[in-house]
Structures are given as structure tokens and as C-alpha cells.
Image (cartoon, rainbow, N blue to C red):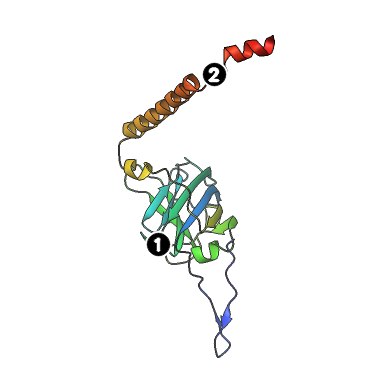
Amino acid sequence: MCIKSEKKKSADGTPVEEIRPPPKQGTLSITLVEAKHLPKMDIHTKCDPFVVISLGNQTKKSKVVKKTYHPQWEQSVVMTYTEAHETPQTVIFEVFDWDKVGSGEYIGHVEINLGDLIHEGVHGMLDLRARDGALVRGHDKNISAIYLEVSMTDQLPWVPPWDPILEEKPAWALLAVRVLAGFWTFLGLVLWCCMRPQPSTALSDKKEQ
């Protein structure tokens, strides 16, 4: 679980929780492994759980695992942020029960402070909590929990300069750029092979004599 910072004490000796500020930029490497003891959300069937990850105004959605109280996603995502756009304080994992209509029925969430995460990663089961903060109980009366692996650095990954230009372009445009880049790379190699200096045949003949 996420390790919180040591608690300071106020003048009367009461522990005061210190909130670590997040770095101005960061990269989160996240793996959704599984969840256990999920509650029964529908009368006639088991859960169809999926997870929504929120980092500031960014969201990522996992696949839906049908008819189970013990979903196994084994799904990895990378999320980044910069001070130029925003500096979020937490990353939130919300578990939903998929429905044919609507965005899904809320089950519970886990919230991790980025200031803590930069010092200590998360590798293990974390209890799910309802919106009011209460622990979520599963169909078997056990506490519902989600297994997460989360690490964070204050560095950003390298992004090709053309990615921001193509970010909101259709998929065919991105494919066309990649094909064109590959073609010019191949053409450059062919020209280099054809135009590079060749050893003199006359000099070769003298050496043989």
C-alpha cells in the first residue's frame, strides 16, 4: 500500500498528517492487476467490472471483465502531466459495474496522493471505499479490494515532434505519416549504399600482382 509520510504533532501533541506536494511534472506507470470480493450489483447476474483512472482532467478506461466478482485485468497504462496544463494532487481509480445503458454503476474507489507516490510506489491490494468514505463490502461480506502496481517519476517520456500535431487527427493520417517516414528512411539507406565510394579496381589489381 501507499506509505504515508510521518505525522507531525501540533502544540497539544495531536498528530497532524503532512501532505506531500506532487512534483510539477510526472509520469505514472500503472498496472491494473485484479480485484476481489466485489459486491453483487445486479439481481440476476454477477458484476461486469471495469476501472476508470483519473489524473486531473485525463481519464483512462480499462476493459470490461464479464460476470465475475474477481476480475483479472492485467492491463498497463502510462499517464503523464505537466505544470503547463495542471498539477493534479491525486490519481483516482474508480471501479464500475458495466451496464448496457449509461456509464455504469459505481462500486468504489481508491485515491492515491501523488506526493506520497513519488517517494513510495504502490504494489498490492488497496481497499475500495464508497463515495462517503465507508469501506465497500463484497457479495461474500469481505472487504472489496483492488490490486494495483503504480510507480511514478518526475521525468517525462520522449514524445516525437509530430505526435502533438497528429494527436486529434484520424487514424489514417497517423498511419500515412508513419508509412511516409518509413519510405524516406528506406530510400535514404538505398541511396547511401549506391552512392558511397567504391574501392578502386586498379588498386585492387596492383595488390593482387
The residue under label 2 is: 198
**34 lies left or right of 48:** right
Mark 1 and mark 2 in contact (Cβ < 8 Å)? no
In percent of width and height, residue 164 lies at 35, 45
Residue nearest the observer in this picture, 44 or 195: 195
Report the quarter where the C terminus lies.
top right
At horizontal 37% and vertical 61% (from top left) the residue drawn is 86
The residue under label 1 is: 83
Q: Residues within 10 Å of mark 1 (few under 14, many from 20)?
A: few
Residue nearest the observer in this picture, 100 or 89: 89
Q: Secondary structure at mark 1?
A: loop
Q: Nearer the viewer, mark 2 or mark 1?
A: 2
Query: Compared with residue 134, is residue 200 higher up or lower down, i.e. above or below?
Result: above
Residue located farthest toward the bottom when viewing the structure as drawn:
12
How many callouts does the rendering have? 2
In percent of width and height, residue 53 lies at 44, 53
At horizontal 47% and vertical 44% (from top left) the residue drawn is 46
Residue nearest the observer in this picture, 184 or 168: 184
At horizontal 56% and vertical 85% (from top left) the residue drawn is 14
Q: Secondary structure at mark 2?
A: loop
Report the quarter where the N terminus lies.
bottom right
The residues tagged by marks 2 and 1 sit, at their Cα atoms, a distance apart of 54 Å
In percent of width and height, residue 80 lies at 44, 53
Amino acid type of the residue tagged 2 in the rendering: Gln
Query: Compared with residue 127, is residue 69 higher up or lower down, i.e. above or below?
Result: above
Residue 142 in sight: no
